């Protein structure tokens, strides 16, 4: 690890003024792609969107349990096919237009119906979350009924996801394909402007149905270089820094004048293993690789405890569905070598691992790949690393691993235990069928459990099905599961009301500045040392 000395005022720019007491400035990793919640899939965008919009339901604070939001209440029919929502009557969109049941129907039909007059404002990559909908009915102005073609247990959770946030139909009709630059929701903040490469500015929505937001305005600044985010934070140019490197998060823990908030959520970081071609078709080889990797060292030394060891295909954040008795494979190089010899590979083998250069939720991909490379070398496996820029990487991996790629890194953040298994483990979720099962895993028993679980509306019974699925997948080893990210925010002292949610959303309506919030000044010393691996 190197210590890089950064001249603070040079890094931040001498002319940048400090944020005033009524303004919260958030340093993000990138500019958003869109402020239309139905067209984007990026966590970076979601952090803005959840402050602009609301859905029919939201996650109860501190949990992944749905609770009312724009809906006052809901009822589910005994057969699990009809969801009836009673809507709030005291809600207006930021543009002044009315929120009602027709607005709700507009939102979901825009995504789902190719004949809808505003369907061209897509594409809508997460519309499949609502594929189970057969019809949307409006019995009266403040009642909406979703009729499903089959029971679908993740439905409420999917409504709480950003794909279920409600946009203003009037604004979509006005702006058309440019709506993502002119958003209008019902949330505690409303959109002011978007200066490309500079900022997205929100201000308090004075007609919000709930308690007014704690600050007058929020500015999201894209600060793509992580070292610049660190320097800006220390100089006072930003109030919150997101997605700092593990080394820098560790450096801020316990540092006067700053707070580090950390929380694990429904995130998994794992290695996809190619089961279509090459030596990893043999489960003994897959198990050997898993035993060769020292997860505890990865988490401690590479990720600096910004993650926790994970074991199964269901993140532990879903405590009702994950199996607490399932443990990660131990670090056992001797058993790994024995399994390789049993598979006829005692003289060693060569493998290729695909590695992204960055990507949301990917933690420290190159550093982790290098550590894994060293672990595998100790059991006679030569691992060649091939790295790609994020978009090129996704295109390559999403097409499915071929004879030239044995493994690939991947990370998912999910809202329901169904999402990852159904999109990335089912036989018919292979890339040639439009899914994300890039390692070509196929087990009909796993498919049957996934289908039963998504149709099971009793949560206790549903959780038992996922625990059975976890055990099966753990034995089959289509993936080597490593860990779950502990999301983090580094904030300047004097920022109160911040709370990390297991959903990974950044909800800022309760945030406020007190004490040092207004009088914050740059660090007095001319330079600061920040860690860079």
Image (cartoon, rainbow, N blue to C red):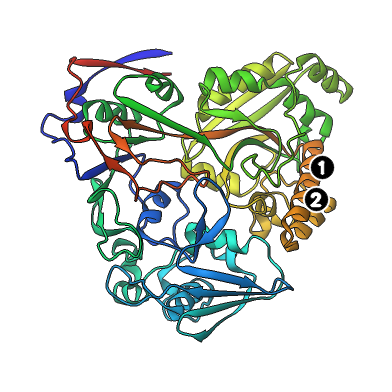
For mark 2, give the secondary structure.
helix
**Where is residue 351 shown, x and y percent of the image?**
68, 27
In the rendered image, is residue 355 in sight? no
Taking the spot 50% from the left edge, 28% from the top edge, the residue there is 364
How many numbered marks does the figure carry? Answer: 2
| Among the two numbered marks 2 and 1 on one chain, the one whose residue lies closer to the N terminus | 2
Give the left or right position of residue 522, taking residue 186 as reference. Answer: left
Q: Nearer the viewer, residue 394 or 348?
A: 394
For mark 1, give the secondary structure.
helix
Q: Nearer the viewer, residue 521 or 270?
A: 521
**Where is residue 352 shown, x and y percent of the image?**
64, 30
Which image quarter holds the C terminus? top left
Residue at label 1? 472
Instruction: Give the spatial CA distance, label 2 vs label 1.
Output: 7 Å
* Quadrant assignment, res 457: bottom right
Above/below status of 356 relative to 292: below
In the rendering, which numbered label is found on residue 1? none
In the rendered image, is residue 455 in sight? yes
**Where is residue 430 shown, x and y percent of the image?**
69, 53
Above/below status of 79 relative to 288: below
Above/below status of 458 relative to 277: below
Which image quarter holds the N terminus? top left
**Where is residue 117 shown, x and y percent of the image?**
42, 81
Q: Are marks 2 and 1 in contact (CB under 8 Å)?
A: yes
Above/below status of 374 relative to 285: above
Residue at label 2? 446
* Quadrant assignment, res 16: top left
Taking the spot 76% from the left edge, 35% from the top edge, the residue there is 278
Give the left or right position of residue 13, taking residue 296 as reference. Answer: left
Crowd around label 2: few <14 · some 14–19 · many ≥20 (10 Å): many
Q: Nearer the viewer, residue 142 or 438?
A: 142
Give the left or right position of residue 294, taking residue 197 as reference. Answer: right
């Amino acid at each position: 690890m190197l210590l890089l000395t950064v001249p603070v005022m040079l890094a931040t720019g001498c002319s940048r003024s400090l944020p005033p007491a009524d303004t919260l400035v958030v340093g993000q990793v990138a500019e958003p792609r869109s402020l239309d919640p139905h067209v984007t899939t990026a966590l970076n965008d979601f952090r803005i969107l959840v402050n602009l919009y609301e859905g029919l339901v939201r996650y109860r604070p501190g949990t992944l349990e749905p609770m009312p939001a724009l809906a006052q209440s809901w009822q589910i029919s005994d057969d699990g096919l009809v969801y009836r929502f009673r809507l709030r009557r005291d809600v207006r969109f930021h543009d002044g237009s009315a929120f009602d049941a027709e607005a709700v129907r507009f939102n979901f039909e825009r995504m789902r119906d190719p004949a809808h007059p505003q369907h061209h404002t897509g594409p809508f990559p997460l519309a499949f979350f609502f594929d189970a909908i057969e019809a949307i009915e409006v019995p009266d102005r403040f009642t909406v009924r979703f009729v499903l073609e089959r029971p679908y247990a993740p439905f409420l959770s999917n409504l709480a996801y950003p794909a279920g946030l409600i946009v203003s139909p009037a604004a979509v009709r006005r702006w058309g394909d440019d709506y993502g630059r002119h958003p209008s929701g019902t949330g505690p903040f409303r959109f002011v402007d978007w200066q490309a490469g500079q900022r997205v500015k929100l201000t308090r929505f004075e007609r919000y149905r709930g308690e007014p937001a704690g600050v007058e305005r929020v500015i999201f600044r894209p600060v793509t270089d992580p070292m610049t985010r660190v320097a800006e934070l220390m100089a006072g140019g930003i109030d919150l820094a997101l997605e700092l490197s593990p080394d820098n998060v560790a450096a801020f823990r316990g540092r006067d004048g700053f707070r580090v908030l950390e929380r694990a959520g429904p995130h998994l970081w794992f290695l996809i293993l190619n089961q279509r071609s090459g030596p990893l078709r043999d489960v003994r080889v897959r198990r050997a690789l898993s035993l060769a990797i020292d997860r505890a060292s990865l988490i401690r030394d590479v990720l600096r405890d910004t993650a926790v060891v994970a074991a199964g295909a269901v993140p532990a954040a879903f405590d009702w569905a994950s199996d607490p008795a399932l443990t990660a494979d131990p670090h056992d190089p001797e058993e790994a070598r024995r399994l390789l010899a049993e598979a006829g590979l005692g003289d060693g083998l060569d493998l290729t691992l695909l590695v992204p250069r960055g990507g949301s939720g990917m933690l420290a991909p190159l550093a982790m790949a290098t550590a894994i490379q060293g672990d595998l070398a100790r059991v006679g496996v030569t691992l060649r690393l091939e790295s790609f820029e994020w978009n090129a990487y996704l295109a390559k991996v999403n097409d499915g691993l071929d004879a030239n790629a044995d493994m690939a890194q991947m990370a998912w953040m999910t809202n329901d235990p169904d999402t990852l298994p159904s999109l990335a483990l089912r036989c018919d979720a292979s890339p040639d069928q439009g899914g994300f099962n890039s390692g070509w895993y196929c087990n009909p028993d796993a498919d049957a459990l996934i289908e039963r679980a998504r149709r099971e509306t009793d949560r206790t019974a549903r959780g038992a099905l996922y625990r059975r699925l976890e055990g099966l997948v753990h034995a089959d080893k289509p993936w080597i599961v490593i860990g779950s990210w502990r999301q983090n925010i580094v904030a300047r002292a004097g920022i109160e009301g911040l709370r990390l949610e297991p959903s990974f959303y950044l909800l800022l309506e309760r945030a406020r500045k007190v004490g040092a919030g207004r009088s914050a000044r740059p660090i007095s010393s001319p330079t600061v040392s920040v860690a860079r691996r």
